[in-house]
Image (cartoon, rainbow, N blue to C red):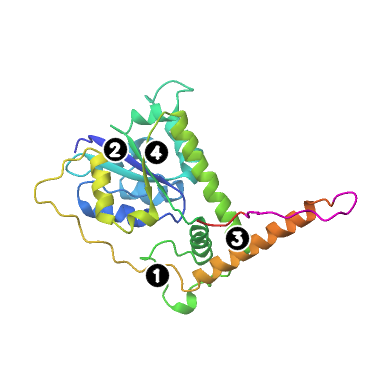
Amino acid sequence: MRTRVSYFVCTTVRSGSNLLCEILRGSGLAGCPDEYFYGAFYPRLFTRFGAASFADYVPRVIEATTTENGVFGAKMMASYFFHQFVPEVAGLPGTGEAGMPAAARLVGIFPGLRYIWLTRRDKVRQAISHLRASQTSLWHSTEVYASAAARPKARYSYEGVANAVLSDAAGNAEWQQYFSDSAIVPLSLVYEDFVQDWEGTLRRVLDYLEVPVPAGWRPGDYPTGQKLAAGDSDTWRERFVEESLAAWDRYLSEHSSAPANDAPVASGPSTKPTAGG
């Protein structure tokens, strides 16, 4: 199947990308987006697509997963796109001269390449989801353990949530810089919005990709997999916000200096940074 248009779902961990890709695959019109270019998956994927090397793998996966209307899609996490995938592409023959911008190289491999940038508004809830998944090794609702007793338990950690917030911020900063440097205007989607109108989001994506919608077409069923969010996620979020505000108060107290004459300082309206949002 000749590929007419390609796209990357550009995101960070626990942004709702699994759900978005399931919806896109279910449409039958938007390729079969998945994490085809995460290096840790290469041994399994190379075997699946009968490839002996990265140079052999790329055209095979594009051809095999392009839908009949000529659309190819893949999911890309910032954590490996910039530091693994882009260098791999730079090593492929026929992708341009040394020093050529990554975006220009990619267009030569992925026809009509476009970008969908998926973010999550509630950064703290995203970070909690990230921490839980990393502790339990449950990244998708289809992953199961033989018994509940075998499943690792998630434990709250202020440092763990904070580090996940920072990791997400760093990843989104990399995407923003890439789009800016490459003069790319991606289709921006927000998890909290698309779950409220998944069909409208799907139609926005198809319109962005300029994919004709056949007369009488209807989207596939909404994925009904089990949500991985635990019942105490709200408690974790409240605890993290409270501890963040307490840390901010301590910082202000430790770094404030009293006037030399010890006169009382007039107090006025003040604001504190809030987590999440």
* Residue 48 rendering spot, x and y as whole percentages: 32, 50
Label 1 near label 2: C-beta < 8 Å?
no
Question: Magenta part mainly helix, strand or loop?
Answer: loop
* Residue 31 rendering spot, x and y as whole percentages: 25, 46
3D distance between C-alphas at marks 4 and 3? 34 Å
Q: Is residue 260 magenta?
A: yes
Q: Which residue is mark 2?
A: 6
Left or right, 168 with respect to 49, comes to right
57 or 105: nearer the viewer = 105
- Amino acid type shown at disc 1: Val
- Amino acid type shown at disc 2: Ser
User: Mark 4 or mark 2, which is nearer the start of the sequence?
Assistant: 2
Identify the secondary structure beneath mark 3.
helix
Answer with the quarter of the image where residue 58 lies: top left
3D distance between C-alphas at marks 1 and 4? 30 Å
Label 1 crowd bin: few (<14), some (14–19), many (20+), radius 10 Å = few
Q: Which residue is mark 3?
A: 160
**In this rendering, which labeled residue sits more in front, label 1 or label 4?**
1
Q: Is residue 65 visible?
A: no
* Residue 179 rendering spot, x and y as whole percentages: 44, 34
3D distance between C-alphas at marks 2 and 1? 32 Å
* Residue 43 rendering spot, x and y as whole percentages: 41, 49
Answer with the quarter of the image where residue 19 lies: bottom left
